[in-house]
Image: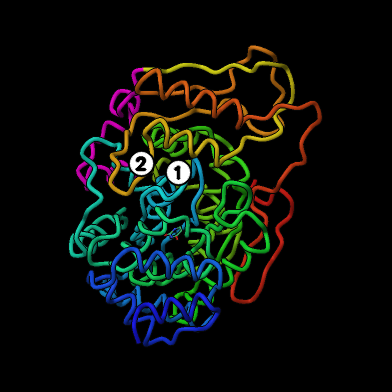
Amino acid sequence: MTVVELIERKRNGGRLSAGELRALMQAYADGSIPDYQMSAFAMAVYFRGMDDEEIEALTAAMLHSGRTLELGHLKLPRVDKHSTGGVGDKVSLILAPLVGACGVAVPMMSGRGLGHTGGTLDKLESIPGFRTRLSLEETAAQLESLGVAMIGQTQEIAPADRKFYALRDATATVEAIPLIAASIMSKKLAEGLTGLVLDVKTGAGAFMPKLDDALRLAKTMIALGERRGCPTVALLTDMDSPLGEACGNALEVEESVHCLRGEGPADLRAVTLALAAEMLLVVGVATDATDARARAEHALQSGAALDKFRALVQAQGGHPGVVDNPVAILPRAPIRERVVAGRAGIVQRVEPRTIGRAIIALGGGRSKVDDEVDPAVGIVLHVRPGASVARGQSVATIHARDPETRQVAEEALRQAIVLGDEAPARRPLISHRVTVRGVEELPFGGAS
Ligand code: URA
């Protein structure tokens, strides 16, 4: 069977066997299949989809293209969280040390920016000296000594996904449930976890904007986790506007430090605490939802989460001063200018994709796989949907490297922040909880 025949079969709506998918992903990982053929394959999957068996086989093929973390010797439960991606989503930076401070090991493996969304690794690397490229052995040792490690997908972990992820980013083939589910779960299942929590985004800035698709994605990933013995839970959270106020790598680290100090935007804090509670529950450290919530809140309020973040930064070579004085330590863009409202009104929308693309235009994300990311640039939003603004009131601050990109970002912001006269419909921040047992709709504003 040639690669062309496999692409042709998928293009025509047929299915591929587990053996065929394994051979395809292995050959792609070792360089025997060129990018142009895998691009065609990804596009065929995008349009034709995959059945459950194919998704399971694709996940296994990517998982077994590399090594797995061996953490069985750790006495602690091991839990991670993965987000399907969003704009301003800096939750991982707060969550990993917070949950690590609750007596659970958190081997958090994150990605780089994908499409219009930001990536935790790019954010962490804006901290001077911070190393995300730990070997599996270093990661295991740090988990033993500190209980938390924040790492990138090394060459060793699911290398087929690593390559395929970058290819999908460049070929408009990210937004496909089988590909997202297999990509996320192949990495997570390589971490040797005893529990996993998924943050599945819905709304305009999510890869799966519609609720039904987001639920399908959540159920698909939960089935993959549970079938391989990893208890998996998902929360559906809103990505109809950016999370928090800061969008851009160093700016998001600064906001995360505020949140770890018990300050910061309410939506960011609410999503983080809800995910933290699920992480403590899924591995059985907390007895029930109330206990889980209390433990997570205590870790934040007592300063234990902040101390764990300081220790994590130090352990991975980062400048520990970022915790006490982020503004002095993090890179700063030379141009910082406010954008003001051209009219009075009520904010109807803050369009996350437009903001995400503006960050890329500022240099804070990638248009091509090998683009360098400028850690300093970004946008800080001063308004969110439902806010009333006066004419001339500042709605955002642009952090830019040069006047040209500042101008592009300003034009994007004028499109992204839509003003009107009526109060917009409110959206729940955390709408559903999905487990292997079913879907629970949460009370409106279930996060607070
Ligand atoms: N995150 C991933 O790791 N993979 C995807 O495909 C999308 C989000």
Direction from residue 429 to residue 98 in the image, left or right = left
Q: Residue at x 34, y 74 (%)?
A: 63
Q: Which mark, residue 123?
A: 2
Q: Quadrant of ligand 1?
A: bottom left
Tell me the residue that label 1 is attached to.
Answer: 90
Residue 293, compared with residue 179, is above or below; it is above
Q: Position of residue 157 (x, y in %)?
A: 28, 67
Q: Quadrant of residue 192?
A: bottom left
Give the position of the C terminus as an image quadrant: top right
Residue 84 on the magenta segment = no
Total marks drawn?
Answer: 2
Q: Position of residue 243 (x, y in %)?
A: 55, 41
Q: Is residue 249 visible?
A: yes
Residue 440, compared with residue 12, is above or below; it is above
Amino acid at pointer 2: Lys
Highlighted range, magenta: 308-334
Residue 243, compared with residue 171, is above or below; it is above
Amino acid at pointer 1: Lys
